[in-house]
């Protein structure tokens, strides 16, 4: 899995962030030039020897079992944002043991954070509370940015709200987004007896910082926990495109989770119902996302052929007449994850997969966001890093790409916010997937002082659904609950259209299970596929604005009647019902070519007609014995003679195009019938538009 460290760019972004802060105030600026100063402890005890001499501060460890340290009360307030930086050099002692900075220490010295480096170029971030030491970041490999014995290192700590950023020699080596300020005290330390360090140029600076919120984050926003929450941990949710189905991952006992579903009846959400086997087995089961039609579910982990748990990874299951099929494994090229956590998101068209992983033991960061694209064989490409505008050196995870395919929501512990993990929004600027707007926080109403796990929204995009651990809101029931909340105006995605309907047999009006393709009529680019319900023929697709779409259904033994929908001027969310029809391949059947386009009064085929022409070409190639008659029609505007000529010329344009594409002349004929055989009234523009058409009739099959 290709992966490029973005340390330099992330450092530049971090400096930019610092430059956006204000009211810098230097509190301490110590050069250690005055040996008589009382500001720093100078003493020789059983634990350490401390003295100022020759313009530096000396610290030597004296105790076999305890740290040697220089303890200092910096007078910081709990909510201060600050920068601590100093030079430090080891000059004697064990070069494989740590030295560095203890910070955020309470007066009793029972809670603190500890950042260590060694002269053998290792580093570690730890926390100490509840009488236990926690390895918050434990690197197994050397870092070349750390200098060795008798060389100066510059250590810098930047605390911005809940975020810690740690630098060594002006390179950020860690970010930790769950900082809990235990106190204002610090200590510079050595771990072992006989270790000796020199310290110089100690500086403490405080500053103000405001979280960059989306527009409207300061306005009153409604939020509520949903009624189906229980005392269990409802930790992850996904809402369907139409907003009427909620999938929830819930922990059900130790080392087990299951997928549950709730339906919205137009007034309230129903109780959660557990999905059946094989979706839920006796392992870790979790929802990732669903297709817009809900006929396909994407699931955490993989399954054995008998439906039992297999291993970590991703699976997909499709609805059948009898329920859900056994989930099949989805392969992603060179997907590597060294973190114990992973998260995924599939877009509703299944073409794009977003992934949060740690791909390398040597990485500075915990988790980063990547994108992968579907290939022709159904597997996915090697993940591509989304870049330093989004990814930090902490955890960036649980991505959700809105139906507009541009607006990305994700959780992060690597940005200063309101809690240990906040939800941020950014917008994709181009198709490289590297250029994004600067992430913005969804604000203090959406993001609590706790942990916001994931966000999901329906196609309309006015409200979001959130896995939250906010215990301050009424209705909280369990460890994690699902919340409905109003999105701030600046966090809403671009408008889309939810197209829904049924795929029907044109001859009998019976529902058909079919595959639906939707594409750009101008460029031919395919935007996605969907499947109609195997029992009802119902389908849902979500189309972003700015495109003139064509879409068609397909099933064996049928010819599709294509449809189109021009969304180039869409400026608000819409829901459009559009039934799709399939015509059985039978002699005498007429099929309208809806996606043929001509300029007014002309018969030259426009480029946007190519998809329809290619569909007809493919039909004839797959059915070598088929013969068709191409028929042109007009409305009643204009003279009969002119309309007859125009209809003949338009039918002949299709005829000539097929000949140029190697269809035998003996299989084709064309005729123009002018104003004859109208399919609608000519008294309205809508009716006249329906009457202006080109069809073909199956003569032989």
Image (spheres, rainbow, N blue to C red):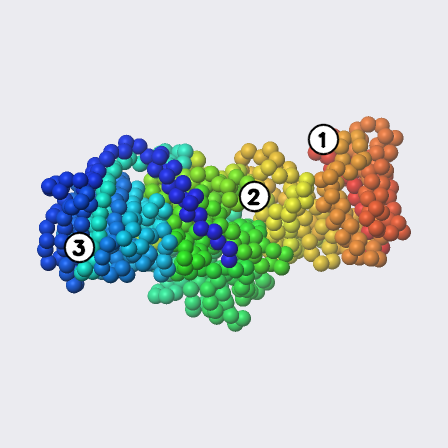
Tag 3 near tag 1, CB within 8 Å = no
Per the model, the C-alpha gap separating discs 3 and 2 is 56 Å
Give the residue at mark 2.
431
Q: Nearer the viewer, residue 642 or 665?
A: 665
The answer to whether residue 160 shows anywhere in this view is: yes
Q: How crowded is mark 1: few (under 14 residues within 10 Å), some or many (20 or more)?
A: few
Say which of marks 3 and 2 sits in front.
Answer: 3
User: At 22% from the left edge and 59% from the top edge, which residue is drawn?
Assistant: 93
Per the model, the C-alpha gap separating discs 1 and 2 is 42 Å
Give the residue at mark 1.
684
Say which of marks 1 and 2 sits in front.
Answer: 2
Among the two numbered marks 1 and 2 on one chain, the one whose residue lies closer to the N terminus: 2
Give the residue at mark 3.
60
What percent of the width, then of the height, locates residue 543? 58, 43
Per the model, the C-alpha gap separating discs 3 and 1 is 94 Å
Among the two numbered marks 3 and 1 on one chain, the one whose residue lies closer to the N terminus: 3
* Left or right: 532 in relation to 327: right
User: At 84% from the left edge and 57% from the top edge, which residue is drawn?
Assistant: 625
User: At 71% from the left edge and 40% from the top edge, which residue is drawn?
Assistant: 608
Tag 3 near tag 2, CB within 8 Å = no
Q: Identify the element where label 2 is drawn.
A: loop
Tag 1 near tag 2, CB within 8 Å = no
Specify the quadrant of the image occupied by residue 486.
top left
Outermost residue to the front = 54
Q: Identify the element where label 1 is drawn.
A: loop
Outermost residue to the bottom = 306
């Amino acid at each position: 899995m290709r992966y490029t460290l973005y340390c330099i760019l992330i450092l530049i972004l971090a400096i930019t962030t610092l430059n956006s802060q204000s009211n810098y105030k230097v509190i301490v600026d110590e050069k250690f030039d005055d040996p008589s100063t009382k500001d720093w402890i100078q003493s020789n005890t059983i634990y350490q020897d401390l003295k100022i001499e020759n313009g530096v501060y000396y610290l030597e460890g004296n105790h076999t079992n305890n740290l040697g340290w220089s303890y200092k009360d910096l007078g910081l307030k709990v909510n201060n944002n600050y920068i601590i930086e100093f030079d430090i050099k080891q000059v004697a002692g064990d070069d494989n043991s740590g030295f560095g900075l203890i910070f955020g220490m309470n007066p009793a010295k029972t809670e603190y954070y500890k950042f260590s480096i060694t002269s053998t170029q290792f580093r570690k971030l730890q926390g100490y509370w509840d009488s236990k030491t926690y390895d918050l970041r434990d690197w197994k490999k050397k870092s070349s940015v750390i200098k060795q014995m008798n060389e100066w290192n510059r250590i810098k700590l930047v605390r911005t709200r809940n975020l810690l950023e740690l630098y060594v020699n002006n390179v950020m080596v860690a970010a930790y987004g769950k900082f809990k300020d235990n106190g204002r005290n610090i200590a510079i330390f050595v771990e072992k007896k006989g270790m000796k360090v020199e310290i110089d140029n100690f500086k403490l600076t405080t500053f103000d910082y405001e979280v960059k919120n989306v527009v409207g984050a300061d306005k009153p926003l409604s939020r509520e926990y949903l009624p189906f929450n229980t005392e269990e941990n409802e930790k992850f949710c996904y809402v369907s495109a139409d907003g009427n189905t909620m999938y929830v991952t819930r922990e059900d006992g130790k080392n087990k989770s299951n997928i549950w579903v709730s339906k919205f009846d137009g007034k309230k959400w129903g109780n959660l119902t557990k999905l059946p086997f094989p979706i839920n087995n006796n392992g870790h089961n979790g929802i990732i996302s669903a297709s817009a039609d809900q006929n396909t579910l994407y699931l955490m982990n993989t399954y054995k052929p008998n439906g039992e748990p297999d291993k970590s990874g991703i699976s997909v299951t499709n609805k059948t007449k009898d329920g859900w099929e056994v989930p099949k494994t989805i392969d992603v090229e060179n997907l590597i994850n060294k973190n114990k956590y992973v998260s995924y998101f599939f877009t509703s068209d299944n073409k794009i997969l977003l992934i949060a992983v740690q791909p390398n033991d040597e990485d500075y960061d915990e988790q980063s966001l990547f994108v992968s694209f579907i290939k022709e064989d159904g597997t996915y490409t090697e993940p591509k890093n989304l870049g330093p505008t989004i990814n930090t050196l902490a955890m960036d995870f649980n991505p959700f790409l809105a139906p507009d395919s541009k607006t990305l929501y994700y959780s992060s512990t690597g940005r200063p916010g309101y809690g240990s993990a906040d939800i941020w929004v950014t917008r994709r600027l181009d198709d490289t997937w590297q250029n994004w707007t600067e992430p913005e926080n969804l604000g203090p109403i959406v993001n609590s002082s706790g942990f916001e796990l994931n966000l999901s929204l329906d196609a309309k995009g006015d409200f979001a659904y959130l896995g939250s651990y906010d215990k301050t809101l009424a209705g909280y029931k369990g460890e994690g609950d699902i919340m409905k909340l109003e999105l701030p105006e600046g966090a809403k995605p671009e408008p889309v259209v939810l197209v829904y309907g049924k795929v029907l047999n044109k001859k009998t009006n019976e529902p058909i299970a079919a595959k639906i393709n939707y594409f750009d009529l101008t460029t031919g680019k395919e935007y996605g596929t969907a499947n109609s319900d195997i029992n009802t023929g119902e389908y849902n697709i979500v189309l972003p604005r700015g495109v003139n779409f064509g879409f068609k259904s397909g099933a064996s033994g049928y010819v599709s009647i294509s449809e189109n929908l021009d969304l180039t001027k869409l400026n608000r969310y819409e829901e459009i019902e559009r039934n799709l029809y399939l015509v059985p391949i039978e002699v005498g059947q007429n099929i309208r070519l809806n996606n043929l386009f001509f300029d007014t009064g002309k018969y030259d085929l426009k480029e946007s007609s190519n998809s329809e022409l290619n569909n007809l070409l493919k039909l004839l190639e797959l059915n070598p014995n088929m013969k068709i008659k191409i028929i042109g029609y007009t409305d009643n505007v204009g003279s009969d003679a002119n309309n007859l000529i125009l209809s003949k010329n338009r039918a002949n344009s299709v005829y000539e195009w097929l000949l140029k594409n190697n269809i035998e002349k003996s299989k084709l004929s064309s005729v123009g019938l002018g104003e004859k055989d109208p399919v609608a009234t000519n008294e309205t523009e809508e009716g006249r538009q329906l009457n202006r058409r080109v069809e073909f009739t199956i003569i032989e099959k």
